Image (tube, rainbow, N blue to C red):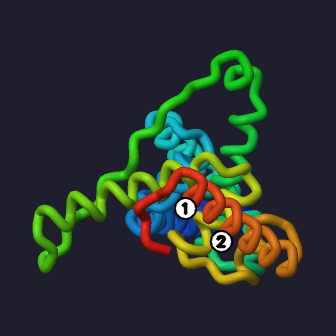
């Protein structure tokens, strides 16, 4: 009887493990690009963003059993990634070695725009991204998650462990800072 219970438990663990493995594959397919982009917005280094993204998936795999499903898996993965980014930025390594320079993300040209329009739009996108990346962390993270990842205010509050009003205030202040930066440099970006 004990041997049978042990065998059933092993089958259950195997099935659960298989479903977690399938979950991780699904997450990688659905969220890897977005999580990498999010990590890059914090660390401003492509290789480190990739490392953090991989680490986020590993941590999610390891901690899936403890996931209480009080939020969506997407929100949970974003929270893991943000925490890993913050840990990285607090580490002694990053304090000793400050890296500068950021390549803008490549955008895929639209079928309807001309090459000239694409180049102009790409240049404006790169300029805007550079300005976003110079914002203080608390403003940058809400701007990126709200506008690029399309999180709503409630989801942002949950991911960042702040109140919805704090999210709204940071969004307003972040937009204000961006407008000031763009105005002071005489930017060509349309508002």
41 up-or-down from 76: above or below? above
- The CA span between labels 1 and 2 is 22 Å
Q: Which secondary structure lies at badge 2?
A: helix
| Horizontal side, residue 112 vs residue 166: left or right | left
Viewed as shown, does residue 94 lie left or right of 54? right
Q: Is residue 35 left or right of residue 94?
A: left
Residue found 43% across the figure and 72% down from its top: 190
Q: Label 2 neighbourhood size at 10 Å, few (<14), some (14-19), many (20+)?
A: some
Residues at circles 1 and 2 in contact by the CB criterion of under 8 Å: no
114 versus 70 height, above or below? above
Residue 58 in percent (x, y) is at 57, 48
Q: Residue 99 location, x and y as percent?
A: 57, 25
Q: Secondary structure at mark 1?
A: helix
Residue 17 - label: 1
Q: Quadrant of residue 112?
A: bottom left
Residue in front for this viewpoint, 19 or 188:
188
Tell me what residue is drawn at x 86 percent, y 80 percent.
165
The part of the image, by quadrant, that contains residue 125 is bottom left
Q: x and y percent of residue 94 in the render?
A: 68, 25
Query: Which of the numbered marks, if any, corresponds to residue 94?
Result: none
Residue drawn at the location 74% of the way across and 74% of the way down = 172
Q: Nearer the viewer, residue 167 or 60?
A: 167
Residue 86 in the image, given as x and y percentages of width and height: 73, 44
Please tell me whether residue 86 is drawn above or below residue 113 in the rendered image. above
Q: Which residue is mark 2?
A: 75
Number of callouts in the render?
Answer: 2
Q: Is residue 6 visible?
A: no
Q: Residue at x 23, y 63 (%)?
A: 108
């Amino acid at each position: 009887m004990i041997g049978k219970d042990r065998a059933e438990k092993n089958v259950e663990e195997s099935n659960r493990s298989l479903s977690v493995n399938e979950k991780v594959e699904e997450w990688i397919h659905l969220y890897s690009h977005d999580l990498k982009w999010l990590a890059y917005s914090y660390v401003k280094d492509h290789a480190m963003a990739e490392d953090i993204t991989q680490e986020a998936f590993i941590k999610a795999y390891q901690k899936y059993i403890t996931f209480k499903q009080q939020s969506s898996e997407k929100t949970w993965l974003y929270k893991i990634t943000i925490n890993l980014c913050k840990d990285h930025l607090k580490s002694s390594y990053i304090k000793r070695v400050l890296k500068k320079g950021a390549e803008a993300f490549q955008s895929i040209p639209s079928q309807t725009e001309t090459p000239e329009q694409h180049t102009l739009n790409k240049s404006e996108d790169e300029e805007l991204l550079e300005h976003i990346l110079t914002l203080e962390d608390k403003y940058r993270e809400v701007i990126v998650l709200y506008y690029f990842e399309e999180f709503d205010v409630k989801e942002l509050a949950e991911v960042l462990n702040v109140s919805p009003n704090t999210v709204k205030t940071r969004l307003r202040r972040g937009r204000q800072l961006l407008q000031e930066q763009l105005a002071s440099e005489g930017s060509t970006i349309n508002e």
